[in-house]
Amino acid sequence: MPQKDFNKLSERQKAILRFMHQYIESHGYPPTIRNIGEATNITSTSVVNYNLNKLVEAGYLERSEHISRGLRLVGTLPGMRRKRVKPENQVARIPRIGHIVASKPVQMPDDTGHYYDEEDMMEVPPTLLMGADPNEVFALEVKGDSMIDAMIREGDIVIMRHQQVAQPGDMVAVWLLDRSETTLKYYHPEGGRIRLQPAHPMMEPIYVDAANCQIRGKVLSVIRKLG
């Protein structure tokens, strides 16, 4: 999408973009709507939402309603240079246990395991855990692009909570028992079968028997791959 001239944005929209740039550079992940409102003196979340949508239309943001902090800054801001700032000292330690496929299901060994070495651990801001116990959370690197419209791309890291149940529309990691395959999709139970819905305009949903679909975890948040 072509970018609108930065100078033609409203002052409020420019302020939102500047704050988002600074916040992402400092924290490594996007701010919440509340963070944006507080930083730009906007008291109404609906007004923040309105301006975020305008910035999407202007080509400066990508946005997903399905993922916490689902904002990606994609535009070039005048005078803004990338500067890495040391993140907050407070972190949570969770295991990074491998990959999850966001494409057609592929065969993977059933070996997520329960024991992790020090080299398997990664540090993340506690806010990405969405209140979950760190002992119930793990991280997976995404392979494939079937969830691209949910702003999850190859190389991104999904933060997941161990759980075996999900609500319709949740994004989950599922193990297909009859195929010994795994995949990352939206979960939609439909009677005796499960529709595993990708977020890609060129990909069809996958239908599986409910008895052969085992939920392994629900996506809490995403760490975007820079670049």
Image (cartoon, helix red, strand yellow):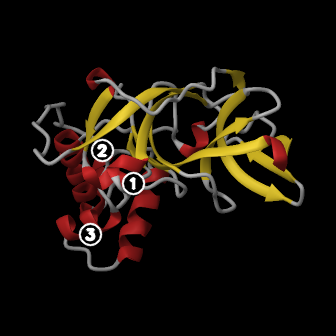
Nearer the observer, disc 3 or disc 2? 2
Q: Residue at x 19, y 73 (%)?
A: 41
Q: Is residue 55 left or right of residue 179?
A: left
Q: Nearer the viewer, residue 207 or 13?
A: 207
Please state the horizontal and vertical placement of residue 206, each as a whole percent of the image.
81, 39
Q: In this view, does 117 lie above or below 207?
A: above
Please say if the residues under marks 1 and 2 sit with CB atoms less than 8 Å apart: yes
Q: Which mark is residue 29?
A: 2
C-alpha distance separating marks 3 and 2 = 17 Å
Please state the horizontal and vertical placement of residue 29, each as a whole percent of the image.
30, 44
Q: Name the residue under label 3.
A: 37
Q: What element carries label 3?
A: helix
Q: Which amino acid does label 3 sit on?
A: Gly
Q: How crowded is mark 2: few (under 14 residues within 10 Å), some or many (20 or more)?
A: many
Please state the horizontal and vertical placement of residue 12, each as a whole percent of the image.
26, 64
Question: Is residue 163 in sight in this rendering?
Answer: yes
Nearer the observer, disc 3 or disc 1? 1
| Nearer-N-terminus badge (3/2) | 2
Q: Residue at x 46, y 25 (%)?
A: 155
Name the quarter where the C terminus is drawn. Answer: top left
C-alpha distance separating marks 1 and 2 = 8 Å
Q: Which residue lies furthest to the bottom in this view?
A: 43
Q: In this view, does 118 lie above or below 188?
A: above
Q: Is residue 213 left or right of residue 91?
A: right
Q: Which mark is residue 69?
A: 1
Please say if the residues under marks 3 and 1 sit with CB atoms less than 8 Å apart: no
Q: Is mark 2 on a helix, strand or loop?
A: loop
Q: Is residue 90 left or right of residue 205?
A: left
Q: Residues within 10 Å of mark 1 (few under 14, many from 20)?
A: some
Q: Which residue is drawn at 33% across and 49% down?
A: 134
Q: How crowded is mark 3: few (under 14 residues within 10 Å), some or many (20 or more)?
A: some
